[in-house]
Image (spheres, rainbow, N blue to C red):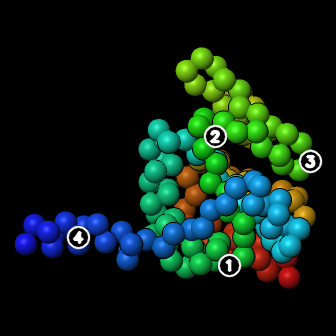
């Protein structure tokens, strides 16, 4: 019985400690922007990137940040190497570029300033008219991200 209690505790702790940021897709974004225009956050990462994993944990741990994003932004978590479907974004279609066993999505290259070797994680923030308002390569500190997003929210009103 004690083992079962410990197991259940360990399974439920993440539910109470982490506040999930709601993620969507580019299809959701296209529909959502027509109904309710909001700024967009595109977070580009790699599953093998240890900095990306640390950043994700830190961001989801910050309840105020998760609430800020969920209430005021469309958030797309986009894995650069494993997203293989065709994506329509800003009137253009982007496809996965295979390179043998791996590859990269064309959209990552289109959004990145460093076309030959994008830096991960990569943050792209667009205003509700889809104009670039924030570009950040590398780990984003939750405190600084919150400040930047609050400024974007206040400038949208």
- Residue 89 against residue 69 in the figure, above or below: above
The first of marks 2 and 4 along the sequence is: 4
Local crowd size for mark 2, using a 10 Å CA cut-off: few (<14), some (14–19), many (≥20)? some
- Per the image, label 3 sits on a secondary structure element best described as loop
Residue under pointer 3 = 91
In front: mark 1 or mark 3?
A: 3
- Per the image, label 2 sits on a secondary structure element best described as loop
In front: mark 1 or mark 4?
A: 4
Dividing the picture into quadrants, the one containing residue 153 is bottom right
Question: Which numbered tag is attached to residue 83?
Answer: 2
Q: CA distance from mark 4 to mark 3?
A: 47 Å
Asked if disc 1 and disc 3 are in contact, CB closer than 8 Å, the reply is: no
Question: Which numbered tag is attached to residue 8?
Answer: 4
Question: Which numbered tag is attached to residue 71?
Answer: 1
Residue 130 on image: x %, y %: 87, 59
Residue ID at (78%, 61%): 29
- Per the image, label 4 sits on a secondary structure element best described as helix
Dividing the picture into quadrants, the one containing residue 152 is bottom right
């Amino acid at each position: 019985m004690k083992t079962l209690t410990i197991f259940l505790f360990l399974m439920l702790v993440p539910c109470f400690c982490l506040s999930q940021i709601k993620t969507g897709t580019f299809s959701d974004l296209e529909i959502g922007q027509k109904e309710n225009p909001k700024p967009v956050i595109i977070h580009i990462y790699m599953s093998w990137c240890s900095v990306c994993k640390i950043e994700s944990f830190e961001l989801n741990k910050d309840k105020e940040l998760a609430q800020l994003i969920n209430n005021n932004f469309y958030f797309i978590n986009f894995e650069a190497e494993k997203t293989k479907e065709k994506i329509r974004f800003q009137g253009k279609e982007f496809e996965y570029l295979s390179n043998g066993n791996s590859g990269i999505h064309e959209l990552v290259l289109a959004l990145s300033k460093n076309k030959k070797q994008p830096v991960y994680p990569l943050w792209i923030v667009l205003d509700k008219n889809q104009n670039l308002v924030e570009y950040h390569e590398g780990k984003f500190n939750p405190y600084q991200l919150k400040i930047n997003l609050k400024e974007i929210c206040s400038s949208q009103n």
